[in-house]
Image (tube, rainbow, N blue to C red):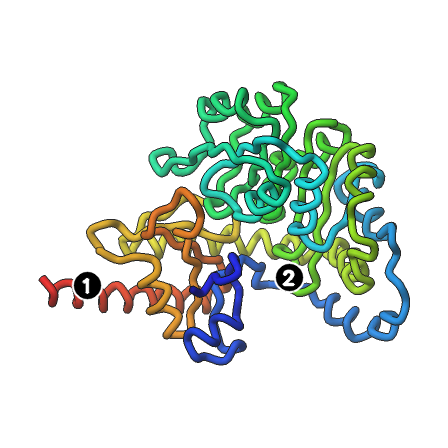
Amino acid sequence: MLERYGHGGDLWTAEETFGWPKDQFLDFSSNMNPLGPPLVVQQILSDAWRDIVKYPDPAVRELRSKLAQKYEIPMESILVGNGAAELIDLIARVLKPSVTGLARPSFSEYEEAIHKTGGGIYNIPLRSSHQFELQQQDMEAAYSAVDLFFLGHPNNPTGKLIPRHILSNLIESGRSCVLDEAFMDFVADEQEHSLLKLASTSRQLFVIRSMTKFYSIPGIRLGFMVAHPEAIREIQQQQVQWSVNYLAQRIGTAVLEDEKFERNSRHWLQEEKAWLTGQLRQLGLDVVFTEVNFVLFSFPEPMGLTVKQAQKYMGQQGILIRDASLFEGLSERYCRVAIRLREDNVRLIEGLRLMLAAFGAESRTKS
């Protein structure tokens, strides 16, 4: 299985499976910004390598100061981690919820972190009939059953933001909630939707952000959490010392200053998202509207095609796509692809077109 370790972007397994060299795959299975990393990352790696003989700042002060300035929140409300994955695991271990409400489908690491603490899961359905948008009645049904909500905002793999009235009701209910805003940087009107500021003073709300997706630095591992200062101190006590290395701190601080990169990324995404989703629909695929840099779609039942068949065919052509049926709540017909540069997206569409023609011819032969 290509997602042997639960994620896209596993080029080592792809090489073993399809026989292509790792550096020759066109990877639509992981959701990185194709405009990155920013050029300043290359400069830091070139200039700062001698400084790895020093210990990193255990309090990550410079990066936290930059984050506080950018998002207008107190430094004391920020905890930086070794990617969002570490922070997801930390918050689960500290809060130790008995039952956690998860919207399905959603990122598998939420459930994995909760299971490690012995907690149970309450499934909140996201239905295709509602374009996978979270519904108020389903949230209300969960209120009496859970002691923590763990929600993607925007959600992965659906690309949907949580409706504002649902977030307002959740906050007013006083129930604890962790919002994973890993892809919020890609949202055009980010400041209108993010709850970072509210989380910095709230005792019930925790917001996790990733820096690896937007700035294309997944190999560096960098993310941060925003919560009430007392909660941050409690969580930090459970964090492994030296969790955030020296280069990650330097790179994180530098990329936050690159406003041009941020503007260019949002401009690219709005244009390319419209083009790619339009092309996917022209192929006859059922496309879910997305707010971010990836697209969830399904093969209509009459096509008689499963995502595993599609993944095998495309992988043999050197193009990697994500098997979205591995997300609980999605059928074997669902696929997720990243939005990349136009040249790459054209190759994806051509590959899918050839595949649909090949499978169509095969099905006609069988019938």
Of residues 294 and 266, the one nearer the viewer is 294
Of residues 104 and 222, the one nearer the viewer is 104
Question: How many neighbours does mark 1 have within 10 angstroms: few (below 14), some (14-19), or many (20 or more)?
Answer: some
Q: CA distance from mark 1 to mark 2?
A: 38 Å
Residue 343: image location, x then y, percent: 45, 69
Q: Amino acid at mark 1?
A: Gly
With 354 as the anchor, is 339 left or right in this view?
Answer: right
Residue 181: image location, x then y, percent: 62, 43
Q: Quadrant of residue 237?
A: top right
Of residues 343 and 330, the one nearer the viewer is 330
Residue 228: image location, x then y, percent: 78, 32
Q: Amino acid at mark 2?
A: Pro
Can residue 1 be seen here? The reply is: yes
Closer to the chain start, of discs 1 and 2, is 2
- Relative to 226, residue 346 above or below: below
Q: Secondary structure under badge 1?
A: helix
Tell me what residue is drawn at x 28 percent, y 67 percent. 355
With 288 as the anchor, is 62 left or right in this view?
Answer: right
The residue that disc 2 covers is: 218
Tell me what residue is drawn at x 56 percent, y 27 percent. 146
The residue that disc 1 covers is: 360
Tell me what residue is drawn at x 9 percent, y 62 percent. 367
